[in-house]
Image: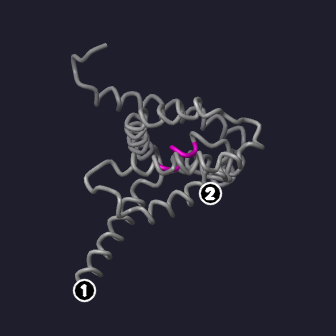
């Protein structure tokens, strides 16, 4: 009985580690397929419950995110009638194409996200805080301006400059990661 408990505890630890590490990616996948952020958050919760229930079916060493996104796909399809009242409703063919594109772009988006995180760290603290405040959920330019001690106009100008700086930095980081003398 002790061995069974130990195995179950280890399985829970693996599940929690995987969910913690990949929840952002799973949410991003869901949010590409669902028209409303709150609905996407609800679906992430529902997907997480199913992942927990079916975790013993996951094969260690395989792609957890792909497995979890497949579960999310079926949750989304099951829940589509909730979205029928939405202004934007895609048929199954369009939904499948968007889902496939999201899966194909995941490695590139992960790489871009990693480069952006590094570029954000290179900014002076005041500028980094302005950008992070602007893009945190429920915030906006007015809140970012207030927290940074800038006027709204100054915040808009700073954010436009910082977006360009970050874009150039990410582009440069990704270009440096590409193999030299590669294909066009």
Residue 2: assigned label: 1
The part of the chain drawn in magenta is 26-31
Q: Is residue 25 visible?
A: no
**Picture quarter with the N terminus:** bottom left
* Relative vertical location of residue 147 with respect to residue 102 in this rendering, above or below: below
Magenta stretch prevailing secondary structure: helix
Q: Nearer the viewer, mark 1 or mark 2?
A: 1
Magenta-drawn stretch contains 28: yes
Q: Locate residue 59, reporting x and y percent.
A: 29, 55
According to the picture, the residue beneath numbered tag 2 turns out to be 42
Q: Nearer the viewer, residue 11 or 57?
A: 57
Percent x, y of residue 14: 32, 65
- Position in image of residue 86 (x %, y %): 75, 41
Query: Furthest residue to the top?
Result: 184
In depth, the one of 166 and 104 nearer the eye is 104
Q: Residue at x 55, y 46 (%)?
A: 30
Residue sitting farthest toward the bottom: 1
Asked if residue 63 is among those painted magenta in the image, a careful observer would answer no
| Quarter of the image with the C terminus in it | top left
Q: Residue at x 56, y 45 (%)?
A: 131
């Amino acid at each position: 009985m002790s061995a069974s408990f130990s195995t179950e505890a280890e399985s829970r630890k693996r599940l929690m580690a995987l969910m913690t590490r990949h929840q952002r990616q799973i949410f991003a996948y869901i949010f590409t397929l669902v028209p409303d952020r709150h609905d996407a958050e609800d679906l992430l919760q529902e997907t997480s419950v199913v992942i927990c229930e079916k975790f013993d079916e996951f094969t260690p060493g395989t792609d957890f995110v792909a497995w979890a996104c497949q579960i999310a796909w079926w949750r989304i399809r099951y829940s589509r009638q909730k979205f029928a009242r939405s202004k934007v409703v895609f048929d199954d063919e369009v939904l499948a194409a968007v889902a496939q594109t999201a899966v194909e772009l995941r490695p590139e988006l992960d790489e871009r996200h990693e480069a952006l995180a590094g570029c954000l760290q290179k900014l002076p603290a005041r500028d980094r805080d302005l950008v992070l405040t602007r893009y945190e959920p429920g915030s906006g330019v007015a809140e970012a301006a207030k927290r940074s001690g800038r006027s709204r106009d100054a915040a808009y100008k700073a954010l436009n400059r910082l977006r360009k700086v970050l874009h150039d930095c990410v582009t440069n980081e990704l270009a440096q990661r590409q193999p030299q003398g590669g294909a066009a």
